[in-house]
Image: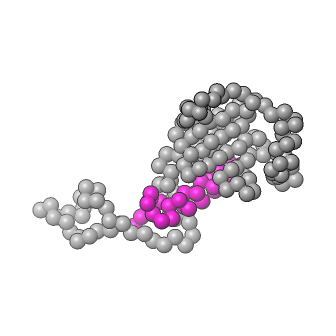
């Protein structure tokens, strides 16, 4: 049967480094004074600089392109694990060999796959993304539903194939 789990990306936006993207305009930021290194101060405690700035090397929440950079970062790494994007569904991936679905909404990942694949897929994703430990779907939001194993019937699988027309290479889901 199939089962599902959620995992959040740990400090998601900050996982993306600016150097990973071509054409990123250098961004410089002012640090709060309590974050200034000791070498910025004279022996008498006064600062050597008026308004010191540092180059931003990692993605930062609040930057106008932060969401885009995180999405590109996550997409590249998810594909490294064997997932492919589902055409027409921006946040949905399918792993053809492991028969797994992965939904990504900002920093929330939801995985549905055969029970035997759960641990292995999360382990692979954790090699390329920093994720919090996964939890069963029902641990995140209580919808008054119970989680149980589900194995689709041949008719349900055929309906999905016909209705969504999802293909990967020459093979339908």
Point 58% across, 57% down: residue: 71
Q: Is residue 91 visible?
A: yes
Horizontal arrangement in the rendering, residue 166 relative to residue 124 (left or right): right
Horizontal arrangement in the rendering, residue 3 relative to residue 27 (left or right): right
Q: Is residue 79 above or below residue 145?
A: below
Name the spot of residue 169 as percent of width and height, x first: 84, 54
Q: Which quadrant is home to the C terminus? A: top right
Point 73% across, 33% down: residue: 2
Q: Nearer the viewer, residue 150 or 23?
A: 150
Membership of 57 in magenta stretch? yes
Name the spot of residue 105 as percent of width and height, x first: 59, 50
Image: magenta residue range? 55-82
Q: Is residue 26 above or below residue 15?
A: below
Point 31% across, 61% down: residue: 31
Q: Nearer the viewer, residue 79 or 60?
A: 60
Q: Quadrant of residue 36?
A: bottom left
Name the spot of residue 166 as percent of width and height, x first: 81, 51
Membership of 73 in magenta stretch? yes
Point 73% across, 41% down: residue: 100
């Amino acid at each position: 049967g199939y089962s599902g789990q959620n995992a959040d990306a740990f400090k998601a936006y900050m996982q993306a480094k600016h150097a990973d993207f071509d054409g990123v305009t250098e961004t410089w930021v002012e640090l709060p004074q309590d974050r200034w290194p000791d070498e910025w101060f004279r022996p008498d405690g006064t600062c050597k600089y008026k308004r010191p700035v540092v180059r931003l090397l990692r993605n930062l929440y609040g930057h106008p392109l932060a969401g885009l950079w995180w999405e590109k970062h996550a997409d590249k790494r998810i594909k490294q694990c064997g997932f492919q994007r589902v055409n027409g569904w921006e946040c949905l991936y399918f792993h053809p060999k492991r028969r797994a679905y992965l939904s990504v909404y900002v920093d929330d990942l939801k995985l549905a796959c055969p029970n035997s694949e759960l641990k292995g897929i999360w382990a692979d994703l954790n090699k390329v993304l920093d994720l919090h430990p996964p939890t069963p779907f029902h641990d995140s939001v209580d919808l008054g539903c119970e989680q149980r194993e589900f194995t689709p019937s041949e008719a349900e699988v055929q309906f999905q194939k016909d209705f969504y027309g999802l293909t990967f290479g020459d093979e339908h889901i």
